[in-house]
Amino acid sequence: FFSLFSIIGFAQEEDNERSNFKFDPSKIYIGGSLGADFSSNGSFIDISPLVGYRFTEKFMAGPGLIYRYMSFNGVGAHSYGAKVFSRYFINESVFAHAEYEYIDWQPLQIDGAGVISRAKRRQAGSLLVGGGYSSPLGESARINIMVLLEVLNDPNSPYRNRSSPLIVRVGIGL
C-alpha cells in the first residue's frame, strides 16, 4: 500500500518537472562535420549536420543526418542515414559522447582481376561511444575533436574491418 503511494507520488513529481519544461531557443546547438579527401585515384566526401538541445549545462542531445560519397578509379557510391546523439560535459572542455546511427551504404569491391564495382547495398545500425575535447573558436563557435569506438560490430557496418577500430572526428558547433 505504501509502495503504491510512493510510485504515484514519484510519477506526479516527474509530470510536474515535464510540465515546467520551457523551450529556450538559445539552448539549440547546431553542429556536425564536413570532410573531404581527394586524390588522383578517388575521393571521399562526408556531410553530417546535427541539431541538439542543451537540456542542462552539462547534457545535450539531438538528431543528425549523414551523407557520404566515395569513389575509386571512376566508380562511385553514395551512403545516407540518420543518427541520434547525446553528449555529457565532464568539465567545460572534456565530454563523453554516444550516438546511434542507421546508414544505408554501398561498398566498393575489387575482384581478382582488379576491377572495381559496387557491391550490394547494405543497411546497418552502429553504436558509437567515446569522448572528446571542445575548445572555443571565436565568440560563439567551438571546435570538437572526438575519438569513438563502434561497439555493436554489425556485420554490415561500414566501420567493420577497418585498419583501426577508432573513429576520429573533427567538427564545429555553434
Image: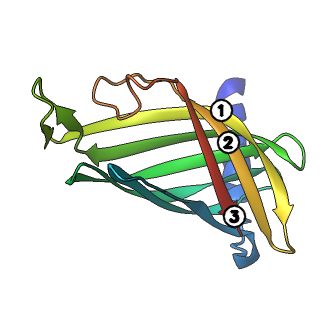
Q: Which residue is mark 3?
A: 173
Label located before the other in sequence (1 or 3): 1
Which one is in front, 8 or 133? 133
Estimate the spatial distance between the alpha carbons at disc 2 and disc 3, rounded to whole Å. Answer: 13 Å
Q: Please name the amino acid that badge 2 sits on.
A: Met
Q: Residue 27: image x %, image y %? A: 74, 69
Which one is in front, 101 or 55? 101
Query: Which colour assignment does the render follow?
Result: rainbow
Residue at the location (42% across, 26% down)? 162
Residue at the location (22% across, 53% down)? 76
Mark linked to residue 65? none
For disc 1, the neighbor class at 10 Å (few under 14, some 14 to 19, many from 20) is some
Q: Please name the amino acid that badge 3 sits on.
A: Gly
**Quadrant of residue 143 in the image?**
bottom right
| Left or right relative to 140: residue 21 | left
Please report contact status of discs 2 and 1: CB closer than 8 Å, yes or no: yes
